[in-house]
Amino acid sequence: KKQYFYNYIWRWHFYAGLIIFPVLFIMTFTGGMYLLQPQIEDAIYGKKMYLTEPHKGNIDHDALIAKATTIYNAKKVHSYQPPHNNKQTAQIILTNDNKEKLTVFLHPNNAEIIGTINEKCRLMNIAKAIHGGLMMGIFGEIIVELVACWTLILVITGLYLWWPRRGKKRGKFLPQFKNRGWKLWRELHAVPGAWASIWIIAIILTGLPWSVIWGDLFRHGSYAI
C-alpha cells in the first residue's frame, strides 16, 4: 500500500510538472527580469538615463515639466522623477495627444530632450504584461493563477517524494554524489528542489492575493474581517 501511494504521488508530481512547465518557465524568466530590472534598463536605456557629464547647479523642475508637456502636447502627466544624483537625467511620464504613453528624458540644467521611450514598447512593461497574464487578458491571468496553484501541488508532492524513508539519510540535506545514473539525477533534482521549496511557496502565496479568482476571494474575505 505504501509503494502504491508513493507511485500515485509520483505520477501527480510528474504530470503536474509536465503540464505547467512551459508557463512556469515563462513566469520564472519574466520574474527574474523583475529582479534584474535596474541592470537591464541601464544596459538598454543607459544613454537616455545618464549624462555624459555631471550637471551642476539648481534644477527648475517646473520648467522641465512645462517643456516636456509643451513639446509632446501632453494631455496628462503621470509622474515626474527628478535625478537622484548629478549624473542622471530627469524623467517625465506623460500621455500625448495621440494617446501614446511616453517617458521623456531631459537634461536637468537646460531642459534638453535626451530621448524618449514609448511605454508600450518598454521591455520591462512587456515582461510585466507577460508575467501577469501572458498578454492574453483575463484568460491569461486565469491560466497564470492555475499554474501557480498547480505549482503548489508540484512542490508538496515533491517534498513527499524527497523525504527519506526507512531511516535512511540519503538525499536529506545534501546530494549524494556517489550515486550514479538516474539515482544521481534524482539527488540533483530532489535536494535543491527541497531547499528551494520554501522560497517557491513564499512567492506563490504572496502572489496569489493579486490574482483574478483567489485574489478576489482574498480581498472580499479581508473586507469581511
Image (tube, rainbow, N blue to C red):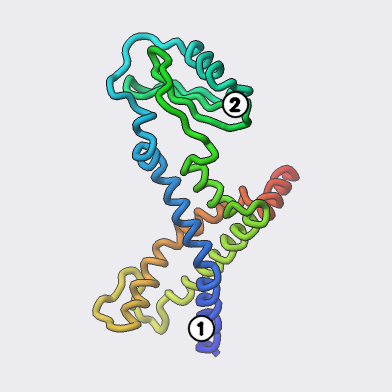
Q: Which mark is residue 96?
A: 2
- Tell me: residue 109, above or below residue 193: above
Looking at numbered disc 1 in the image, what kind of residue is underneath it?
Answer: Tyr
Comparing labels 1 and 2, the label whose residue is closer to the camera: 2
Which residue occupies the foreground of this view, 159 or 14? 14
Residue 31, image x and y in percent? Answer: 47, 51
Residue name at image x 34 percent, y 82 percent: 183
Give the quarter of the image for residue 77.
top right
Give the quarter of the image for residue 60.
top left
Q: Which mark is residue 6?
A: 1
Which quarter of the rendered picture does the N terminus lie within?
bottom right
- Tell me: residue 101, above or below residue 193: above
Residue 27, image x and y in percent? Answer: 50, 56
- Tally of numbered tags: 2
Find numbered disc 2 in the image and state the secondary structure of the residue it sits on. loop
Residue count near mark 1 (Cα–Cα under 10 Å), binned few <14, some 14–19, many ≥20 = few
Which residue occupies the foreground of this view, 183 or 81? 81
- Tell me: residue 91, above or below residue 28: above
Q: Which mark is residue 61?
A: none
Which quarter of the rendered picture does the C terminus lie within?
top right
Judged left or right of residue 43, residue 163 is right
Residue name at image x 41 percent, y 84 percent: 166
Residue count near mark 2 (Cα–Cα under 10 Å), binned few <14, some 14–19, many ≥20 = some
Judged left or right of residue 173, residue 73 is right
Find numbered disc 1 in the image and state the secondary structure of the residue it sits on. helix
